[in-house]
Image (cartoon, coloured by chain):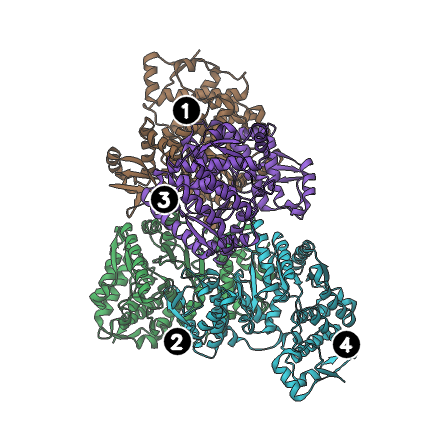
Chain colours: A cyan, B purple, C brown, D green
Amino acid sequence: MQVTVSPRGSMDQLSKAEIQQLQMSSKSPLYQLYRRCSLAVLSSGAHLDNAETMLNSARTFDINILCVERGIKIELINPPKDAFVDGKIMRGIQEHLFSVLRDVLFLNAKLLPSANQQPQEEATNLVFDILRHARALSLDQDPNLIVCWGGHSINEYEYNYTKEVGYQLGLRELDICTGCGPGAMKGPMKGASIGHAKQRYPNGRFIGLTEPSIIAAEPPNQIVNHLIILPDIEKRLEAFVRMSHGIIIFPGGVGTAEELLYLLGIKLNQKNQNEPLPMVLTGPKKSEAYFKSIDNLVAKTLGKEAQAMYEIIIDDPIKVAQTMRQGADDIKNYRKKTGDSFQFNWGITIDHAFQTPFIPTHENMSQLDISKHVDKAQLAATLRQVFSGIVAGNVKSETVQQIEDIGRFQLHGEPEIMQLIDKILQEFVAQGRMKLPGSNYEPCYDIL
Amino acid sequence: MQVTVSPRGSMDQLSKAEIQQLQMSSKSPLYQLYRRCSLAVLSSGAHLDNAETMLNSARTFDINILCVERGIKIELINPPKDAFVDGKIMRGIQEHLFSVLRDVLFLNAKLLPSANQQPQEEATNLVFDILRHARALSLDQDPNLIVCWGGHSINEYEYNYTKEVGYQLGLRELDICTGCGPGAMKGPMKGASIGHAKQRYPNGRFIGLTEPSIIAAEPPNQIVNHLIILPDIEKRLEAFVRMSHGIIIFPGGVGTAEELLYLLGIKLNQKNQNEPLPMVLTGPKKSEAYFKSIDNLVAKTLGKEAQAMYEIIIDDPIKVAQTMRQGADDIKNYRKKTGDSFQFNWGITIDHAFQTPFIPTHENMSQLDISKHVDKAQLAATLRQVFSGIVAGNVKSETVQQIEDIGRFQLHGEPEIMQLIDKILQEFVAQGRMKLPGSNYEPCYDIL
Amino acid sequence: MQVTVSPRGSMDQLSKAEIQQLQMSSKSPLYQLYRRCSLAVLSSGAHLDNAETMLNSARTFDINILCVERGIKIELINPPKDAFVDGKIMRGIQEHLFSVLRDVLFLNAKLLPSANQQPQEEATNLVFDILRHARALSLDQDPNLIVCWGGHSINEYEYNYTKEVGYQLGLRELDICTGCGPGAMKGPMKGASIGHAKQRYPNGRFIGLTEPSIIAAEPPNQIVNHLIILPDIEKRLEAFVRMSHGIIIFPGGVGTAEELLYLLGIKLNQKNQNEPLPMVLTGPKKSEAYFKSIDNLVAKTLGKEAQAMYEIIIDDPIKVAQTMRQGADDIKNYRKKTGDSFQFNWGITIDHAFQTPFIPTHENMSQLDISKHVDKAQLAATLRQVFSGIVAGNVKSETVQQIEDIGRFQLHGEPEIMQLIDKILQEFVAQGRMKLPGSNYEPCYDIL
Amino acid sequence: MQVTVSPRGSMDQLSKAEIQQLQMSSKSPLYQLYRRCSLAVLSSGAHLDNAETMLNSARTFDINILCVERGIKIELINPPKDAFVDGKIMRGIQEHLFSVLRDVLFLNAKLLPSANQQPQEEATNLVFDILRHARALSLDQDPNLIVCWGGHSINEYEYNYTKEVGYQLGLRELDICTGCGPGAMKGPMKGASIGHAKQRYPNGRFIGLTEPSIIAAEPPNQIVNHLIILPDIEKRLEAFVRMSHGIIIFPGGVGTAEELLYLLGIKLNQKNQNEPLPMVLTGPKKSEAYFKSIDNLVAKTLGKEAQAMYEIIIDDPIKVAQTMRQGADDIKNYRKKTGDSFQFNWGITIDHAFQTPFIPTHENMSQLDISKHVDKAQLAATLRQVFSGIVAGNVKSETVQQIEDIGRFQLHGEPEIMQLIDKILQEFVAQGRMKLPGSNYEPCYDIL
């Protein structure tokens, strides 16, 4: 089966030089990445029960770029059948296919080479360039973008709660930004789309920020009408923070806890103390324990100052939405005063520590300074890294193997903090939020 | 609480004379009807569990028409709180409020008086006038409107099935028309709105046709973006038939069976034999028995000719949607040939018997000629009336009382047909589709 | 040659009954009127030098109404060739053709019969109905419609001046309404369309109000994007006054003087003393004499009060446009306070005398009371009628004949006023604004 | 006087780095260029008779870039008053101001530095980049862009003819591209805008291609709704050729003759022999001599082959427009076959000789090989250079001075060709198309 797909969405006309670059890079190592991301997007229409069909098409699937009178087209060979309705590609998937082309091939060929890699400023400018190139920064748009974080494999009652919150956000004409994928990423968008319809708000934005390593695992649902693929996890997190006018954290697993620490670390930065960015932790009554665990950890490590950064709202979607609406309006006034852009928060400072990836080797872990005597923002950054490492030591096959080979991580830090982390991980296990290999939780580290 | 609401949707500017007529008629007997329909529309945002609040507001609720610089406004006194988001009326409800004004007050004041009541032609022209006045007949629109009929209190698996069919219709860019209210009226719209979103089809029409006596019981959900209130049940049925480019019948109760007989009666009319109007009966596997019962009744009364009028599709939403898409395309070609309007089927003949209401008195019932020797179309009409009467005799308090007072209906007809009707009613009871007063089904009629 | 033309512009879908009415009335006496108006519209593309071609097509020209799938079409037989570009009808003309159908055939068949002819209120409601039916009363539009009156055969420097005024109006995003035809009717539209373009104001309205008896003599230029044909001269004048947010009077002939007196008569009505409606008399330096003549007449008959109703601005298009912009803004505020419609001035009173036509028979003329002792508004009305009659007596063949047969008009009135009228007519002759039969101006009346 | 102007038109949101670059470059040598171009655009609203006012504002005029919440703004100090209507900037001028910012400052800061100057391919890609960045290459647009060349100081009857041709082009829904400025640059746009209005074609494009050295002399009239400033004359000429779907040459001076030779040179290139690009020379009857002179020169130098490249149409605007419409349609079919872009002609070959500027020094002139024995395309290129040099030697003060100092240009070439050039220059003088210093034409060269 062989299909030709025309451009749709925010793709410019390309120059001959650019098409050549594209065709060349589609034969380069980049090609594998491009093919895999395209396949992920094409598979998002698939029902879960025909995984085998998908694997089959995966093997024979191929993708080419053609040059035609009005620009370029994409040729698909043996694409997943569920991307099509009566032989025609679904328009949502068509858009996503060209988002992949734009962000994976075109940016790599055109933008990234010329970006010289000075850390801070440059990373931010690059994130801006990618978002603008994807036409995600409209000049006419008032602040109204709410970022929703949370687990992708949550309970049904938690999922319904995210839908209800999304519905209330939608009724207030707020747009949604998530990380793509199912669970707490999908619920708010579904809810908001009903809210938008009831308010006759036709141009709601459903922005999905993803990156190449997770797009296959968490393919964008097709409600996403702005799919943007950032080059790595840190740029993706920075994009979330700079675009958002409010952040909601739903229940999730350890990953969600890490995102929360990332955000706290930025908000605790002294330079950001006047920067408004409302942050709400919310879930249904039955999920209250999750937020208690987290709040306790924050209280005992980062203190009252950090706790003041967020509001915990249990079982009250209307209050969550009202808080976000108010927050977005406050941001509008604030940015008018400061002259900052409405759609991209240049004012917030994101330190180098939050822009560079942390790889949990034994060496990196042993160099962490887990101590309450450092700056709170620094401690938040360190905690995020500790968390990241321990989780890897428990579940990531590669890191588990290293620990079997070399021994436990040797951590320098205050035992009190480590015990808190132990506790919270055990609670996550009890709440069914972590799939640990054995039945008992066993630390993968020693405190020195 | 007192709120002023501006016009939204398809309301013209009014002349002074018209505003005076409106203000006068809002003080006339019509006012009670107008107030009740407005309250129904305002209550559609309410959650089911605060019925008491609604009743309370019902008592103190009032509605006035104001005259302002850009036309008219509506003043609400003590409206239901759930129609508002943070103090502002939901735009969907706002549109519906002005649909009520347009169709209940304005039409009654302006259009209906001048309509002289010659039966056939005139009724059709009036239905056309009402639909056009509501801007529901676009010149630019290709045939793509699918009417969905079915019960409003159906099982969860049946509801999910209607959503799935709606989704597949939406993916094929078909619009939905139902009778408003929950169940099989709401599911297809919800599904189609997701399908439209995935196909980036932004102007999907969700048309709700209702009439004053049922709008309170079945308030329009707010996805409906064209709410039209026809003056009576027969005009509403005619509007369905003349607007539709395909009709889907989901499982329902006796009401759904009546609608089916209405449609069969029209399709069996010799004059309509070339008129394409696809008709599909569909439901999930578990609901197959329902359609078997119905198909059996049709086979044994109206015969093969009538069975050929519809297709029964079990558990295959994709096939249903493909059938409808194909049917709508065929209608486009047919109307091009015949020169008929795309959006209003002037070509189909609806006999007088289908345009006038049937009231099940003992006298009317005894005059029915339930016999297979008449014309099939006539038999379908009679069966619809028999059905209507028996159901009333079983459950409608007024008719039940009459039977207690006067005795059973005395029917002239073939026993075989009556036994078939007995049987299907018992099956509906067994399938839980009828709430009968006692545990045993007891006929309310004698065959002579 | 035979062409079929599809609907364009503000025509609704028609019901079968309406199409039958149309087809019937197109065979009735109305047909001649319809055919003549359609031919006028089709001839507006013609260059002046191929009058013969036009006459030829006039003889063989025919027009029919066809009924097709999406409503109706018009069939043209031997239409003027200049209405077409490479065989396709110009879209501006296409719109005008359907305006004629809408206003001449459809209104006559549908609206007019039901309008019972009670004078005042009813005439106003009918004017409103016709304008609304033509979609000329938008709810979203702020007050910005400037009516331009003036002669259709003016000097080139006067024509250029009207263009310049139109340009300045266009730069201020004001829309134009005139009576169709050339000269002072066309100049302001041409100028405004350039002004709109420079301001990137894409939806400028160019409204042409005409009536059946003059459309042939003054066919609408195709810049007119809302052509509306009122049933008679008085309804047309009323439409001008009720739609306008400012009126500019350019130099013209006697007709223009009559329009001015009509407007003064309305503005002098005590009931209208608070009703804002800016009125500017303007022309280039060389045309100053014209306005001096008129101003002198007003001063000596209607007095200072009437002079205060208008402003004379000589040779200053910018000031004219600023006055109109300011006036339109004032009207917005005024109507907000009074709750009157933005697009249709219900508040202004137009007396019966201004709604009914005046026919200059000897009897009617002799009954006029030309006296300064009556109410000023009444005097203005009378003066308009005197003017109308004298002009007819000088130039209209029918009236000239009557005077030859019966003798001069016998007027009862103050000689002073009549001398003023004599004087102004002589001045118009001197200024080349009147084509009188002989070289000397000779009164056609006696004062008693 | 100090005014702040918001962005309008095709300006993206800028990154902080870009705004800094802009603010820096606005203080660099580039600033003078930027200021001068901005002043030119602001002065296009000025009437010709207040040149002094303009010079005054020129002295005190200043321009700054401000950074605000929604991006950037421009601050104007003492701008020309005629750019404003009642204190608000005209939107057409506002758009042009931001075109200048985009093309002069932004491109210089961002795009040009990274463009490494490999001649051929690179120049084309750069032209493409600039046009795309200005959003002048729409994917949805069918081929319909007609380039109009001709003199900017032409007779009134020639100017009226260009308007009439523009009107006929506009009636056929063709868009216009010129070099900005008055005369043959403005007439076609004015005419086409009336044609577009009559055809209700609302999104007509009026593209003005200019470059920094001529924008002050030929400021864009404000009908231009896409103003693009190319970096130099050659890129501007290339932009004309690659964007156009038809080229009309109106009467002009020597500059127009040069443009014609430029185009002939490209069309004569063997590689372009299949490339459709209709070329029409047209003017009113009275201007026929101009085209005879040119046609004679072409016949005797480049021969029949070159004459076949164009069509001369005298006094027939309809035929000109029909030829262009047909040509644009043919190009659509051709590009569909070849797969070339509709809006940018990648297929046509423009040789190095046409991409690099020619500077008429004595040395460069003496190296020209003016001979019919070379390739025709080469001869056309050479002739263009000869022309360019001779004209400079006659009128450009700098070159005239060089000739006084050093002596006449020494040309190697065929006397026959030179005599032809002499002749055509004398004819241009006779037709009043050249303002030569003395009354007699005196050659500034010797043939060797």
Which quadrant of the rendered structure holds the N terminus of chain B? top right
Q: Mark 4 and mark 2: span between their CA atoms?
A: 68 Å
Q: Judge depth for marks 2 and 1 and give the one in front.
A: 2
What residue sits right under mark 4 in the picture?
Answer: A419
Marked residue chain, label 3? B
> C181 or A424: which is nearer to us?
A424
Asked if marks 1 and 4 touch (Cβ < 8 Å), the reply is no
Helix, strand or loop at disc 3?
A: helix
Are the residues flagged by discs 4 and 3 from a single subunit? no
Amino acid type, label 2: Pro
Q: Mark 1 and mark 4: span between their CA atoms?
A: 108 Å
> C382 or B234: which is nearer to us?
B234
What residue sits right under mark 3 in the picture?
Answer: B305
Q: Mark 4 and mark 3: span between their CA atoms?
A: 79 Å
Q: Which residue is depicted at the point 28% across and 53% down?
A: D322
Give above or below for D428 relative to A67.
above
**Label 2 crowd (10 A; few <14 / some 14-19 / many >=20):** few
Amino acid type, label 3: Glu
Asked if marks 3 and 1 touch (Cβ < 8 Å), the reply is no
Helix, strand or loop at disc 4?
A: helix
Marked residue chain, label 4? A
Residue C260 x, y percent position in the rendering: 47, 28
Amino acid type, label 4: Gln
> Which mark is on residue C425?
1
Q: Judge depth for marks 2 and 3 and give the one in front.
A: 3
What residue sits right under mark 2 in the picture?
Answer: D119
* In this picture, residue D185 sits left or right of residue B196: left
Q: Mark 2 and mark 1: span between their CA atoms?
A: 77 Å
